[in-house]
Image: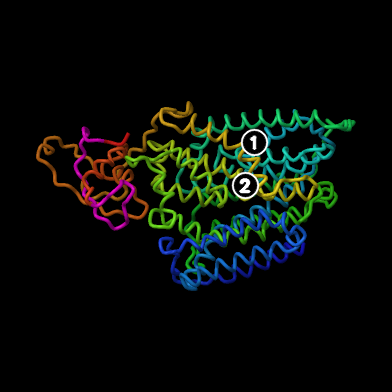
Amino acid sequence: MAFIKKSAAAALLFMALAVPAKAAQSLDGANLPWPLALPFAGMLLSIALGPLVVREWWHIHYEKAAAFWAILTLGGLIAVTGLSAATAGLVHSMALEYLPFILMLFALYTAAGGISVEGQLHGSPLVNTAILALGAAIASIIGTTGASMILIRPLIRANSARGFNTHVVVFFIFLVSNIGGALTPLGDPPLFLGFLQGVDFFWTMRALWPAALFTVAVLLLIFFLVDSYFYWREKRALPVIAGASKLRVSGFVNAGLIGFVILAIVASGVWHPGIGFDLLGTRIELQNLIREFVMVLVGIASILLTRQSVRAANGFEWEPIREVAYLFAGIFICIIPVMTMLHAGTKGPFSAVIYALDHADGTPDNAAYFWATGLLSSFLDNAPTYLVFFELAGGDPSTLMGPLTKTLMAISLGAVFMGANTYIGNAPNFMVYAIARRAGVKMPGFFPYMIWSGAILLPVFAAVTWLFLMPGVVPASLPAPIAAPEKSPERPLGEPAVQKDFAAAKKAPEPKLYTVKPGDTLWKIAETVYGPGHGSSYYQIFEANKNLLSKPRNISPGQMLEIPPLEQSAPTAK
């Protein structure tokens, strides 16, 4: 309870700083030196090596290690950008990313910890596989965090008598905490961000279900075989539990509270009253404030309405959420310069990564998008990583759900699936790790876990790349291609985008000029000036502007591009 009081006081103090202010100077990733990313690497190494090298010190003082790297990051930002820009970056990260993240975890951890499954499940390969399949199925409905918090304790108790049960929790992180959340925006934070950007709610299910079903089925089969091997090689007989099938669930009120959490998350995405205030240059919207308030109320209500005996039966304690809160506070601060550099695109220190995302002709390389999004999601928070690559792909949801649907599939699958590669790739991973470790499961450290995930997941992800993202493979669930909505461009150039008067077309029309805006790509510009469905004609624009552009991706806001008349016979991207 002391942890809750400290956290509440910190949140109130943070919100008390909310005074109207002019927009603070923002961070410019193009001007940040790459060494500012080193504290983030140091933070990751501390999490990986601390429990191994200085075990006793780490478990008592891990918050001090997180504070050290966070202070080093902020000091570097202040030295390079000044106090105003560094403060603006800190407030943005903590107010819009960390607080929603940790308050959601607090609500779900507290409520799920009040649901107790009494009676013993026998942790056989069949039972374990069924629990993992159930968790993967409900993860897209109640979220990966909700499903993880509800099922991890019963799964651990079911396997408590087994001599080796580490793999059970590892596969639980793979399937329930990550991959199972791929079908709806409720399942995983990256998909919810896509929904907020305009991606249709049901697009994820229509587009991603073949890849998700394939991946879940393959991993369940691998788990069943691995679990059967360890189960049958136990040297001592496992105890037979009388009445093991008679289960009783207590704390049903918490299921309703989890429902309130889901409703609050959905409501914040669809209700936009346009009311808010500035917090040192960061816009705080009313719907988000209400969402965070609901999270706090759900946690408090769960504490007040749940009998202590139910939590005791669950082995509930506050240390796992405390550890996650402190360590991820450090991560979210250390990640500020890294995400800012990525947002700078080709102008930033990570330009080599950005250039690798396209084929030579400038069309998106979907396999590159999948692996780049996924590998960065493994070490950065997968939600903002998704948003970065969403913007790099053009940021237009109509185009990304239409002719570039495989690119959006690649970004979505990479962010959701490869969050399982490390303990810090997705919100529930580290929470499950902390709960399992406190329950006595011999969980692998940071790097040993990556050996597990690399050996099992990477070959499966390679198969996903070949089957669902390479050219010529179209998901059975999608008509190919999905036509973009027929509507006029939001910012017309003053003349019709496509010349429909063919009599007038005989007179060679004068080329138009277009000023590049932030977030533009040549594909997006072609869709704007030539009309929906003509994005592949972007190469005509590139050919007309070769004196300015060395590659199709090398465009910058403010450039004036010549827009040639649309010629159907002209070369287009393949």
Residue ID for mark 1: 136
For residue 340, above or below residue 403: below
Image quarter hosting the C terminus: top left
Which residue is rendered at x = 51% and y = 52% of the image?
384
| Residue 546 can be seen in this image | yes
Q: Is residue 149 magenta?
A: no
Q: Is residue 558 magenta?
A: yes
Identify the secondary structure beneath mark 2: loop
| Residue 428 can be seen in this image | no
Query: In the figure, is residue 524 to the left or right of 292?
Result: left
Q: Are marks 2 and 1 in contact (CB under 8 Å)?
A: no
Mark 1 neighbour density, 10 Å: few (under 14) some (14–19) many (20 or more): many
Query: In the figure, is residue 140 to the left or right of 118?
Result: left
Query: In the figure, is residue 275 to the left or right of 172?
Result: left
Q: Position of residue 260 (x, y in %)?
A: 65, 48
Q: Position of residue 17 (x, y in %)?
A: 57, 71
Closest to the observer: 449 or 254?
Answer: 449
Closest to the observer: 143 or 174?
Answer: 174
Which residue is rendered at x = 22% and y = 40% of the image?
498
Residue ID for mark 2: 422
Q: Position of residue 178 (x, y in %)?
A: 61, 42
Q: Position of residue 424 (x, y in %)?
A: 62, 50
For residue 573, above or below residue 271: above
Instruction: Give, as a three-letter code, the residue at label 1.
Output: Ala
Residue stretch in magenta: 548-571
Closest to the observer: 310 or 267?
Answer: 310
Q: Residue furthest front?
A: 53
Instruction: Give, as a three-letter code, the residue at label 2.
Output: Thr
CA separation in Å, label 2 and label 1: 18 Å
On the image, which quarter does residue 292 sit in? bottom right
Which residue is rendered at x = 47% and y = 67% of the image?
281
Front position among marks 2 and 1: 2
